[in-house]
């Protein structure tokens, strides 16, 4: 309904109470700290960035430990667990866990160390497997692979590229070395390589080495043990690594009982890091510290009394200066509250703007309902979101609660428009009646208003009327803001003239029979055509003369005025944009009807019933998911572009109080 008025708060307190004062402010979560004072000979700022980094590293270590546990020892959670929100703990529970924080961080370090050891072990096994695979061609060789020979003989053990027969190998070696006396055995032979064991005299060693080099001879992958012994060793090493991995996983499983304490540690160090970030902003002397910031007007008195009664503190509440842009906090009733997130996603109100959430909510639910426009889908949205809110409403986070309430109200609107247009899972009731119950073609619910599939032009006309109402309300909001600033003439020039021009254009067009017939409405009397035309000309001239009034040069003023009048083309395109209401509404019904027709193709037989149920469930779930997403996206688009474009610019910055911004736990009582 409105933007909460902000006040500036200034607090001066004893330095010995600094921690207690900050603890109190953090728990209250009412002040956005913004110290604007400069350092001087008395008041200085203390750099706490190093301490804050230490706390942030502790938070990161806790998060890393939680990620490791999630990866190796996942929790058993339900599909709806994401709606539960943060757990609540009391002050005494907070203090108990705080006392064991050091032990918790040791557990985090142990978890991280185990994960590293596990990763090293896992990555080491493929290397051992590669070694084993490289030794497999040497399994028949019973000597150490680095055996060099005897006093009178030289031995070459290794592999040659390609596949050789014994005869081809002897021929090639004799040719390249010129040696006739040597022995060469083929240990194994494959298309990629041939493993050999060659013995020759010491005097022929150099010649044979050169011959082998020219044949791309390569030494074996290991030395020392013979291949079979080394493979046995590798198998033992792999077994040891696998056993160690099992031991690590068991230890990680036992450490999973610390998961809640680790979550607390993450929140604890996050709180401390934020606190030290604030300390870096404070102006402090040897005995006094000073802070200032913004506070909502409705909380200023209570916080002032709380600070002055608990501490030796002086608190001053003042109005922000005219040039200041205080942070923005929205306050809406239950009807508009769910749409605060939609407004924030676009931009928060600027300093002199109104909160558009309520007036946009009046149309948002209607637009969404028309785009989905199926009573069956609407009831599913209502029941689904209603159950979630009933089950998790007390613990759910505020942002998620707003989101669920928004879809609950959108579901109610969808149900309403589904009844008005006669759609319940498309034509499911009619298909069930005619296919399985032997009813006539008229069986099923009738629309309370009309059926868009049968009367698309009527639906399109309704969409255009709704478009004009929606955008006229936006233009009215602009008039309200101008009047609030005392700019009466600007309101007349920028709003009233446009109202007159647009209404006169609509009236003039409806006096033309062709246009009226196309839209399916009654033609207006020709007697009002001339007055409408005169109003069009007068308002258009007024826009041309005033659209560029900020320019002193008349030539520029007229050019800017003509450009302002050209904006009427934008109104036309904006109105046409609302035809998406027709398109998405028809798409929902048509797709549902197609799935119903496909499901009924099996006829009245038992198999046909099973087929219909299967196709009905799968098809309508997909249709609901796709078209609900489409309705959400396009409703936002109409709100942001067509509606907000008429009066709203935004630019405000959100109110971000110094608070207990935790991820896992909420503290119920004051610390």
Image (cartoon, grey):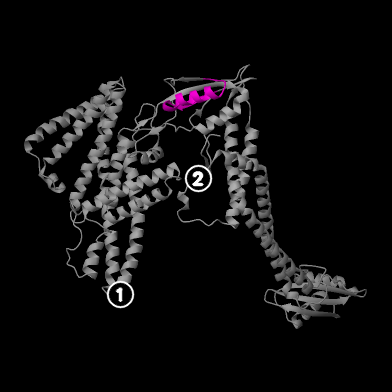
Instruction: Name the residue that disc number 1 marks.
Output: 606
Where in the figure is residue 517, as x and y percent of width and height?
12, 47
Q: Using residue 619 as the reference point, say whether residue 145 is left or right of it.
A: right
How many marks can you see?
Answer: 2
State yes or no: residue 307 in magenta: yes
The image quadrant of residue 298 is: top left
- Residue 273 or 97: which is nearer the viewer? 97
- Residue 314 or 626: which is nearer the viewer? 314
Q: Kindly identify the residue that appears in the image at 65 percent across and 46 percent down.
A: 104
Q: Using residue 155 as the reference point, say whether residue 389 is left or right of it.
A: left
Find the distance from the CA under tag 1 to the CA under tag 2. 48 Å
Q: Kindly identify the residue that appears in the image at 58 percent across and 44 percent down.
A: 264
State yes or no: residue 563 in magenta: no
Name the quadrant of the N terminus: top left
- Residue 474 or 278: which is nearer the viewer? 278
Instruction: Name the residue that disc number 2 marks.
Output: 86
Q: Check residue 300 in the rendering and tell me which mark sits there, or answer none.
A: none
When the figure is inspected, residue 504 is found, relative to residue 255, above or below; the finding is above
Q: Residues within 10 Å of mark 2 (few under 14, many from 20)?
A: some
- Looking at the rendered structure, the secondary structure element under dot 2 is loop
- Looking at the rendered structure, the secondary structure element under dot 1 is helix
Where in the figure is residue 133, as x and y percent of width and height?
70, 70
Where in the figure is residue 317, as x and y percent of width and height?
47, 20
The image quadrant of residue 537 is: top left
Where in the figure is residue 175, as x and y percent of width and height?
79, 77
Residue extending farthest right: 151
Q: Kindly identify the residue that appears in the image at 68 percent across and 52 percent down.
A: 113
Q: Residues within 10 Å of mark 1 (few under 14, many from 20)?
A: few
Residues rendered magenta in the picture: 291-314
């Amino acid at each position: 309904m409105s933007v909460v008025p902000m006040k500036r708060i200034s607090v001066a307190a004893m330095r010995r109470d600094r921690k207690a004062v900050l603890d109190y402010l953090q728990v209250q979560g009412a002040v956005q700290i913004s110290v604007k004072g400069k350092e001087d000979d008395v008041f200085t700022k203390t750099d706490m960035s190093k301490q804050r980094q230490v706390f942030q590293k502790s938070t990161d270590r806790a998060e890393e430990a939680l990620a490791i546990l999630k990866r190796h020892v996942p929790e058993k959670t339900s599909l709806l667990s994401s709606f539960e929100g943060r757990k609540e703990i009391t002050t005494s529970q907070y203090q108990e866990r705080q006392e064991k924080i050091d032990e918790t961080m040791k557990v985090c370090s142990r978890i991280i160390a185990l994960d590293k050891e596990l990763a090293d072990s896992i990555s080491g096994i493929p290397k051992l497997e590669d070694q084993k695979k490289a030794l497999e061609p040497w399994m028949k060789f019973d000597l150490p692979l680095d055996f060099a020979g005897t006093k009178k003989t030289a031995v070459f053990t290794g592999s040659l590229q390609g596949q050789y027969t014994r005869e081809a190998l002897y021929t090639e070696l004799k040719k390249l070395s010129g040696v006739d006396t040597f022995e060469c055995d083929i240990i194994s032979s494959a298309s990629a390589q041939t493993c050999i064991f060659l013995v020759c005299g010491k005097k022929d060693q150099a010649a044979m080495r050169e011959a082998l080099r020219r044949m791309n001879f390569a030494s074996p992958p290991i030395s020392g043990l013979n291949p079979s012994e080394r493979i046995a060793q590798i198998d033992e090493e792999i077994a040891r690594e696998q056993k160690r991995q099992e031991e690590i996983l068991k230890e990680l499983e036992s450490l999973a009982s610390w998961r809640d304490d680790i979550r607390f540690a993450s929140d604890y160090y996050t709180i401390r890091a934020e606190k030290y970030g604030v300390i870096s902003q404070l102006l402090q002397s040897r005995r006094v510290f000073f802070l200032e910031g913004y506070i909502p007007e409705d909380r200023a008195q209570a916080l002032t009394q709380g600070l002055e009664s608990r501490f030796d503190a002086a608190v001053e509440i003042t109005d922000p200066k005219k040039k200041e842009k205080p942070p923005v906090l929205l306050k809406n009733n239950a009807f508009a509250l769910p749409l605060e997130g939609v407004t924030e996603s676009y931009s928060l109100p600027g300093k002199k703007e109104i909160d558009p959430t309520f007036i946009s909510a009046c149309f948002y639910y209607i637009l969404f309902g028309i785009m989905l426009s199926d009573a069956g889908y609407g009831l599913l949205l209502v029941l689904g979101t209603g159950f979630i809110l009933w089950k998790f409403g007390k613990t759910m986070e505020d942002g998620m609660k707003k989101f669920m309430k928004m879809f609950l109200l959108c579901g109610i609107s969808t149900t309403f428009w589904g009844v008005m247009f006669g759609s319940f899972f498309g034509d499911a009731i009619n298909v069930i009646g005619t296919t399985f119950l032997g009813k006539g073609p008229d069986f099923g619910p009738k629309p309370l208003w009309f059926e868009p599939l049968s009367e698309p032009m009527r639906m399109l006309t309704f969409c255009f009327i709704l478009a004009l109402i929606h955008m006229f309300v936006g233009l009215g909001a602009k008039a309200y803001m101008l009047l609030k600033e005392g700019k009466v003439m600007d309101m007349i020039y920028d709003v009233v003239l446009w109202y007159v021009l647009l209404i006169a254009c609509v009236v003039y067009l409806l006096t033309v029979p062709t246009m009226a017939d196309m839209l399916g409405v009654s033609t207006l009397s020709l007697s009002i055509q001339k007055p409408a035309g005169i109003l069009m000309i007068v308002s258009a001239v007024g826009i041309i003369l005033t659209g560029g009034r900020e320019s002193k040069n008349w030539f520029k003023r007229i050019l800017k005025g003509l450009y302002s009048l050209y904006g009427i083309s934008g109104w036309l395109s904006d109105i046409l944009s609302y035809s998406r209401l027709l398109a998405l509404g028809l798409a929902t019904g048509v797709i549902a009807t197609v799935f119903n027709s496909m499901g009924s193709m099996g006829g009245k037989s038992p198999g046909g019933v099973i087929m219909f149920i299967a196709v009905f469930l799968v098809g309508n779930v997909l249709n609901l998911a796709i078209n609900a997403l489409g309705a959400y996206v396009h409703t936002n688009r109409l709100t942001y572009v067509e509606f907000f474009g008429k009066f709203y610019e935004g630019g405000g910055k959100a109110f971000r109080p110094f608070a207990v911004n935790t991820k896992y736990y909420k503290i119920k009582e004051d610390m």
